[in-house]
Image (spheres, helix red, strand yellow):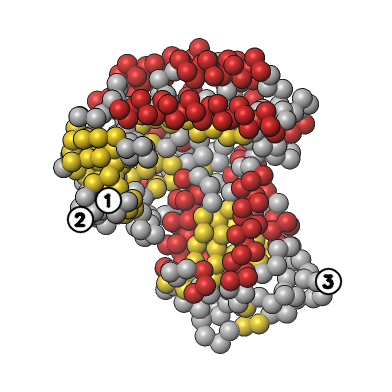
Amino acid sequence: MYQLSVKRNGRPGRSIWRGKMAKKFYLATFGCRTNQADSAAIREQFLSLEYQEADGPKQADVIVVNSCTVTHRSDQQVRQLTRKLHRENPTARIILTGCYAQRVPETLAALEGVSAVVGNSHKDQVAALGTGRGESPFLPSPSEMAEVFRDDFSKARSILAAPATETGGRTRPFIKIQDGCDAKCTYCIIPQVRGPSRSVPPDLVFEQCRELVTAGFKEVVLTGIHIGTYGMHLNPRYPLDRLLTGIMAVPGIERVRISAIEPMQLSHRITALAADSQQIAPHFHICLQSGSDRILKKMLRPYNTARFGEIVEEIRRRIPDAAIGTDVITGFPGETDRDHRQTVDFITRMPFTYLHVFPYSDRTSTAASEMSSKVESPTIKSRGLELRQISDEKNRLFRRRFVGKELSVLTLSEEKDRMRTALSGNYLRVKLDLGIPSNQILEGKVVSEGDDGYLALEV
């Protein structure tokens, strides 16, 4: 670990201590489900210190921004929000954490109003740092120096994980079972900011499931950076399909959903479990990235399109109504019109139900950032638009298949058009009567499809 001090306006900092301990915190989260799971654990940290969650940032004594750094755009959004939060609440102690904080802490430490930058390596200490380690927190001033808490994961063994019964109003709590990544994908910064792959011990995962069931939750979502590698570094090894079997045996677990998984880690055993059990949500998000074998090779992805297609077709054969989503990066360095056409053709042939399309974003210190033949932004934009249009059409056709059929859904805390929203096991969003409470698993008949992407359900 090292600590970095940044001077404000060229003058040494000054500490101002409050006589009465702060009692409210506010938490803003960017990025993936793993980051959302981390935020749930951070929320638990503050609550254990008898802090209350503020209704908004203006009422908070401590503000935590849990950052993402996958793209330039996410970096920009983090900086913009941090400046806005400081303007709206200049007396709050602002803590920046997450992947951006791990990657370039000096940049964030220099932002006005930031009190501390806490990398992913020290995320388990966010609340302690935010509250002055249990003492009266200090109020930042324009000349204050920000501190950085970060190391390079060279000794990383543990994971920030906690039974997140306080979900901030969510009805689908995330359980982080794994963190970090050992892959070498040429475009990805995540291994540098999350560290090596490591897994939460299975007994702790089962304990978290039991606590969530006791708290009344019906569905849990398993998340991580590379969850298909779960248990590979435990001694003895404990594969993901065995973990799933143990989770399904927890009394009261009604639905388990698997987050994004790499294709080569989606074993036949996992597919078989999902096909044979009503507890595992029939929803698979499998990361493709490109439909061009040449680009996949440049990305150092460990498969080709033929192998990927076999995996997708097996799911569709065994679970005909499953949702199958994927990620696609458009505009990777050297991607030609021919590569893009191959991607379009492959995706069109595959039985995907939705796509997440990402424009390539250069990340310094990745292998792809050193590659030549960068694709121009207008080209990336037009290719991305074409892929999103394909995604919209595939999702529309998938939704229409279920009009007149029965669906099992979990009611959510969200509302839309003065109606209760709900989510099916196969990732279809529906609307019901607002009088139906959230966090209920219900069976109903789809009566119509709306232009907004929602189905109308009658229970």
Q: Which mark is residue 10?
A: 3
Q: Please state the horizontal and vertical placement of residue 283, each as a whole percent of the image.
A: 35, 31
Q: Is residue 283 above or below residue 42?
A: above
Residue type (three-letter) at the residue carrying disc 3: Gly
Q: Are marks 2 and 1 in contact (CB under 8 Å)?
A: yes
Residue type, mark 2 in image: Gly
Label 3: how many Cα within 10 Å (few below 14, some 14–19, many 20+)? few
What is the crowding at mark 2: few (fewer than 14 residues within 10 Å), some, or many (at least 20)? few
- At x 64%, y 54%, the residue is 101
List the residue tagged with mark 2.
435
**Which image quadrant: the N terminus?**
bottom right
Residue 289 occupies quadrant: top right
SS assignment at label 3: loop
Which element carries disc 2, helix, strand or loop? loop
In the rendered structure, which disc, 2 or 1, sits on the residue that comes first in sequence? Answer: 1
Label pair 3/1, CB-CB below 8 angstroms: no
Q: Are marks 3 and 2 in contact (CB under 8 Å)?
A: no
Task: Residue type at mark 1: give it.
Answer: Arg
x and y, in percent, of residue 354 in the image: 43, 30
Q: Residue furthest top?
A: 306
CA gap, disc 3 and disc 1: 54 Å
Left or right side of 330 for 312: left
Tag 1 residue: 420
Q: Is residue 217 above or below residue 303?
A: below
Residue 356 in view here:
yes
Distance (Cα) linking label 2 and label 1: 8 Å
User: Nearer the viewer's eye, disc 3 or disc 2?
Assistant: 2
| Apparent side of residue 241 relative to residue 302 in the rendered image (left or right) | left
Among numbered discs 3 and 1, the one appearing first in the sequence:
3
Residue 185, image x, y percentages: 63, 29
